[in-house]
Amino acid sequence: MIASSLSSGIEQLGDLIAAASVIVPFTGAGISTECGIPDFRSPSGLWTRNRPIPFDEFVASQDARDESWRRRFAMEETFAAAKPGRGHRALAALYKAGKVPALITQNIDNLHQASGFRPDDVIELHGNTTYARCIGCGKRFELSWVKQLFDGREHAPDCSDCDEPVKTATISFGQAMPEDEMHRAAELARACDLFIAIGSSLVVWPAAGFPAMARNSGAQLVIINNEPTEQDELADLVIRHDIGETLGPFAGN
Ligand code: NAD
């Protein structure tokens, strides 16, 4: 059912939250747009400007790695300046209140951790862009290390231990999904009684499978997104409004 207005959506969401014992939020890029980080598919989204670089291309080509790091450094001011928004703060308040055990996110911006979630309780399906890892041995690198070497030779550096390429700690198209995270996300989706999908176009698979998994396991499903998603017909409640406006009243400040 689509909420007839923002206020009716907020009221119905409030009732569902009050009645639920275990709430699992599932977030996408839309929760971070009010923090200044563009999403992918909106007209102003990142893909309007840049074709994504698939994983096999990144591995095979130094040019692709250089381009990928150039794009990442170009976004650094935006990522570094971003602070949690009303949506992040509302979810952090529900977490603090003990209603949300953990959340599942497709986002890579670290803003849920910045809002007060313990890192272990943020299940990142697509990784995190605020640091880097060697794709061979998994060694962690800070972006400042990559930047310094990149600036020195205008090429993306390789791992200091094993010489394999270093990449932001994100999951690119064509790269395997993280097994532990997929497993934990499935457990949460099956165990909750309220699943709230927030700011996702719900078209990136396999992540987009979790709302249906929760619904099929008996949870109520709420979708908050300012445009229709492919899964709206599965939802008990669809709130087609701005996320900050919708979740602001739950932020507790
Ligand atoms: P998406 O871009 O496909 O969809 C975002 C959706 O949010 C769109 O339907 C858009 O209309 C909606 N939206 C944007 N701002 C909104 C607002 N203020 N209120 C309500 N709705 C709003 O993003 P996705 O579904 O998360 O999937 C794409 C991939 O994008 C993910 O894999 C993620 O890793 C990556 N991504 C992440 C970030 C980030 O970490 N902040 C930013 C861009 C892309």
Image: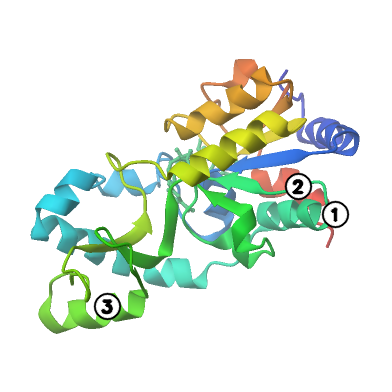
Question: In the image, residue 69 lies at what x, y percent?
Answer: 24, 64
Q: Nearer the viewer, mark 3 or mark 2?
A: 2
Question: In the image, residue 80 lies at what x, y percent?
Answer: 47, 72
Q: Label 3, on which residue?
A: 147
Instruction: Please name whichever residue, 117 or 187, is drawn nearer the observer in this view of the structure.
Output: 187
Q: Is residue 160 above or below residue 234?
A: below
Q: Is residue 232 above or below residue 152?
A: above
Q: Is residue 134 above or below residue 146?
A: above
Instruction: Please name whichever residue, 110 or 166, is drawn nearer the observer in this view of the structure.
Output: 166
- Residue type indicated by callout 3: Lys
Q: Earlier in the sequence, mark 1 or mark 3?
A: 1
Q: Residues within 10 Å of mark 2 (few under 14, many from 20)?
A: many
Residue 224 in sight from this viewpoint = no
The residue depicted at 55 percent of the width and 25 percent of the height is 228
Helix, strand or loop at disc 1? loop
- Residue type indicated by callout 2: Val
Q: Label 2, on which residue?
A: 100
Question: In the image, residue 221 lies at what x, y percent?
Answer: 70, 26
Q: Residues within 10 Å of mark 3 (few under 14, many from 20)?
A: some
- Answer left or right for 54 relative to 94: left
Q: Earlier in the sequence, mark 3 or mark 2?
A: 2
- Residue type indicated by callout 1: Ala
In the picture, residue 25 is in which quadrant? top right
Q: Is residue 118 above or below residue 193?
A: below
Distance from mark 1 CB to nearest ligand 1 atom below 8 Å: no
Image quarter (top left, top right, bottom left or bottom right) of the N terminus: top right
The residue depicted at 44 percent of the width and 31 percent of the height is 206
- How many angstroms separate mark 3 from mark 2 (CA)? 37 Å
Helix, strand or loop at disc 2? loop
- Answer left or right for 184 relative to 178: right
- How many angstroms separate mark 1 from mark 3 (CA)? 40 Å
| Residue 97 circle label | 1
